[in-house]
Amino acid sequence: MLLQRFLVRLLTMLVTLFGVAVVVFVVIRVAPGDPIAMMLPPGASNDDIARLRALYGLDKSIVQQFFIWLGGVLHGDFGTSISLRQDVLGLVFNRLPATLELATVALLMAIAIGATAAILGARSRGTVVEAGIDIASGATLSIPDFLWGLVLILLFGVLVPVFDISGRVSPQLDLPFVTQFYLVESILRLRFDLTWDLLKHMLMPAVALALPLAAIIAQLLKQSLKEVLDLDYVVLARVKGFSETQVILREALKNAALPTLTLVGVQFTFLIGGTVIVERLFSYEGLGNMAIDAVINRDLPLIQGIVLVFALLFVLINLAVDMMYALLNPRLRHG
Amino acid sequence: MDEARIARRGLSPRLWLAGGWLLLALLAAIFAPLVAPQDPLAQDLMLERLPPFWLDGAEPGYWLGTDSLGRDLLSRLIFGGRIAFIVAFAAATSACLLGSALGLIAGYFGGWADRIISRIVDVWMAFPPVLFAILLVAVLGTGLSSVILAIAIIDWTRFCRVIRAEAMSQARMDYVESARIAGYGRIGIMLREVLPNVLPSVVALLSLEMGIAVIVEAILSFVNLSISTDDPTWGGIIAEGRLSIHQAWWVLVFPLITLILTVLSFSQFGEALKARFDPVLR
């Protein structure tokens, strides 16, 4: 049952990815402007142009180009970046860890802030506190990460300059890292001075990404908690003498969390999508920042590679959430 | 029950505040040449980085100060509102028409139509929207129509998903069945019976989408990919403000406040409309 569900989802996922590849390819090939012409100095001979076109496979038909490219992708060959003249996959993998670390820190912050607000709101339901949390989460939700980022830059970069608002790590530091997972590696190497520096750079963009999601979690989890808190078994726990906070943490949270969990999975992909502009805003050297440069430089192979990696990430997260939901939901597990 | 009452009580001032700000900003944008105190493009290096009116060194007539080229910030914000509102209305309406039509077809007819449309939505959902928008504008070329088109191409899925679900539940209801027995055709039922019932959701979403469109336009002009001329845009002013943040904070603060108020108003307006139309809350 579970395996069948997994296989069906896996198949859908492959269809989706194929669709993504087709869309990206079509979008890019209708682009006016010749990337080859931009690479060459003015006055290059027609022979030179033709040779470069052949080198990048741009002289074949669109359908041929697509399948040549797709065949390459399936073998891990994403082509060569036109502007950076390096292997696309290498460039993407070099930047992806920075984005993953940022997104993960943001997700954890969103869950921490959102769950705290939800528990606080459910505990004091019907009071001013709950109304305050409702208003705050409603407003927080309506303001997107781009604007939160700018607000944070003003507050903590200019007004009270306590956090770094530019870059991933202080440039003067000597980095001993062998992977691009700086944050993870700094912890593993017990170099907490570097961990602190990385976190100081990461905090502002992560908060900007986390706030809208935290508001969604606060609203939904609070609603589920309130529903569960009226059920018999919770009433029983209360009669047994547990305090309201204990009742929520021990009894209600576990059963109220499932709908929130599903939503967090979907919303996590939106959060990752937000890294594109937030990284730009904070000059954070991740995949999103590189993507904007690639678009501005009309670097077709690099854009294709980045968009595909993002899409793969999104689809995998959705698959993981779906499977987790199936595993945790007793109705599906035994159905 | 309690919540419904709170929602209704909170509805009025919320609707008025949001609507008031939008109306003010819209009127200022429409009558920009009459309202703006200065020419938004006029540069004057003698007047560069003037602070807003309550600070020392401010010049009369330059209420919110000037940017690093001596251009009047208030006038630039007012003229920037033109682009913002044109994009908001045009892009949101286009996305709405496309998404609602496909959602209605998928939800009401089901079957193959639904399967194909849902697959396309899945593919669309696998793109990071901001990156998709930047990519589309880079491909279509900068300019107002490209920005509008890009937003419509990306955001129709928001309408499609909601309308599909609504149309699906409406299609199963008794009144649709009675209309069919009464001899109406499928398309006739869809347009005459189902469409009016999903309209409240459409209107609420439309207002939300206008706020989103304003943000996307600001993001595009922030990365310098929106309209290519010198015309001021909110995102463009923000990009200037981000650069001169330590010398002239006001160049970032005022467009930011303008954007936040506008986005909040669009979303509050949409929420209030939804609460008003929702039979359960009413």
Image (cartoon, coloured by chain):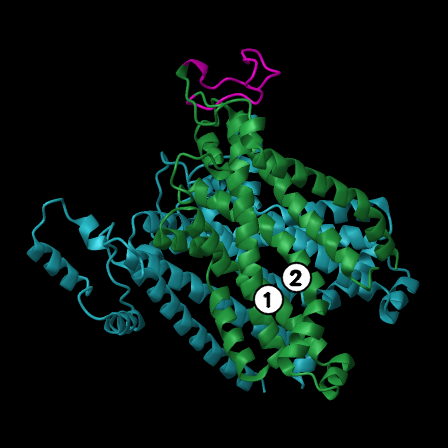
Q: Examine the rendering and report whether any part of residue B110 can be seen.
A: yes
Q: Nearer the viewer, residue A323 or B119?
A: B119
Which residue lies at the image location 53% right of the left edge and 80% below the top edge? B113
Residue B201 at x, y percent in the picture: 69, 62
Secondary structure beneath dot 1 equals helix
Image spot of residue A134 (x, y percent): 76, 49
The residue drawn where x is 46% and y is 62% is: B127
Chain for disc number 1 = B
| Quarter of the picture holding the N terminus of chain A | bottom right
From the image, state the color of chain B. Answer: green
Furthest-top residue in view? B57
Indicate which disc, 2 or 1, sits on the residue closer to the N terminus.
Answer: 1
The amino acid beneath tag 1 is Ser
Q: Which residue is mark 1?
A: B100
Pinpoint residue B163: horizontal percent, then vertical percent: 63, 68
* Magenta stretch prevailing secondary structure: loop
Q: Nearer the viewer, residue A99 or B35?
A: B35
Name the image quarter holding residue B35: top right
Look at chain A in the picture and name its colour.
cyan
Residue A190 at least partly seen: no
Q: Is residue A212 left or right of residue A93?
A: right
State the residue at coordinates (58%, 20%): B63
Q: Dot 2: within a 10 Å radius of its alpha carbon, few (fewer than 14), some, or many (20 or more) residues?
A: many
Whole-number angstrom distance, CA of label 2 to CA of label 1: 8 Å
Query: Which residue range is magenta in the image?
Result: B46-69
Q: Is residue A335 above or below residue B39?
A: below
Q: Name the image quarter holding residue B263.
A: top right
Q: Chain of mark 2?
A: B
Q: Is residue A261 above or below residue B20?
A: below
Residue at numbered disc 2: B202
Mark 2 is on which residue type? Val
